[in-house]
């Protein structure tokens, strides 16, 4: 009977050791899912802003939108949405005539705070990019 009692007590300690070995992997997995979800959300914000900018540049209007107007519109959309970080926006073709292609590209570095700290230099910064091409009306 005493040997069974000692065996039981020994197993409780092994569960604690197994949990201590498994916990870092579980935390990396949870933080990785959360951070990659946030990066995906930021990427979708860039895609939407790029699409809106290309749509503005492709519209046929009497005054005409310049490429600088398109860049300003995209930056305003991202600021209003609360996009974190710096953004580089390039636009071409907004001043061309009907049938020309309007291209809007939005680039932004994205910081992964937890994964970047665990794997420095490899996952610390990811470049997010979105490009939209539309035909000028």
Image: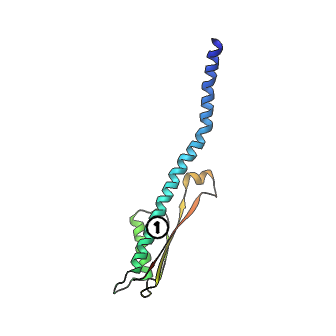
Question: Under tag 1, what secondary structure?
Answer: helix
Residue 8 point in image, percent of width and height: 61, 20
Where residue 129 sits in the image (x, y, percent)? 52, 68
Seen from the viewer's position, the closer of residues 33 and 119 is 33
- Compared across the picture, whether 104 is left or right of 27 comes to left
Give the residue displayed 50% in from the left and 51% down from the top. Answer: 34
- Judging by the rendered image, the residue that carries numbered circle 1 is 47
In the displayed structure image, the side of residue 40 where residue 11 appears, left or right: right
**How are the colours assigned in the image?**
rainbow
Question: The C terminus lies in which quarter of the figure?
Answer: bottom left
Query: Could you tell me how many numbered marks the image carries?
Result: 1
- Quarter of the image for residue 20 reads top right
Q: Is 133 in front, or is 110? A: 133
Return the residue found at the far right: 3
Q: Quadrant of residue 7?
A: top right
Left or right, 117 with reference to 88: right
Q: Residue 73 location, x and y as percent?
A: 40, 74
Q: Residue at x 50, y 67 (%)?
A: 86
- Residue farthest to the top, as pictured: 1
The quadrant of the rendering that contains the N terminus is top right
Label 1 environment density (alpha carbons within 10 Å; few <14, some 14–19, many ≥20): many
Residue that appears at 45% across and 71% down: 50
- Which residue is at the far left? 62
For the point 52% across and 55% down, the residue is: 36
Q: Is residue 126 above or below residue 32?
A: below
Percent across and percent down for residue 74 are 43, 72
Q: Nearer the viewer, residue 75 or 30?
A: 30
């Amino acid at each position: 009977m005493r040997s069974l009692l000692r065996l039981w007590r020994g197993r409780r300690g092994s569960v604690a050791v197994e949990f201590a070995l498994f916990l870092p992997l579980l935390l990396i997995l949870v933080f990785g899912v959360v951070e990659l979800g946030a990066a995906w959300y930021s990427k979708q914000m860039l895609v939407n802003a790029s699409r809106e900018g290309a749509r503005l540049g492709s519209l046929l209007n009497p005054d005409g939108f310049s490429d600088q107007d398109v860049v300003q519109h995209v930056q305003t959309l991202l600021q209003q949405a609360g996009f974190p970080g710096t953004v580089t926006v390039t636009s071409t073709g907004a001043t061309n005539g009907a049938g020309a292609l309007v291209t809007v590209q939005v680039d932004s570095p994205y910081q992964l705070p937890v994964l970047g700290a665990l794997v420095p230099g490899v996952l610390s910064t990811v470049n997010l990019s979105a490009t939209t091409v539309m035909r000028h009306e």
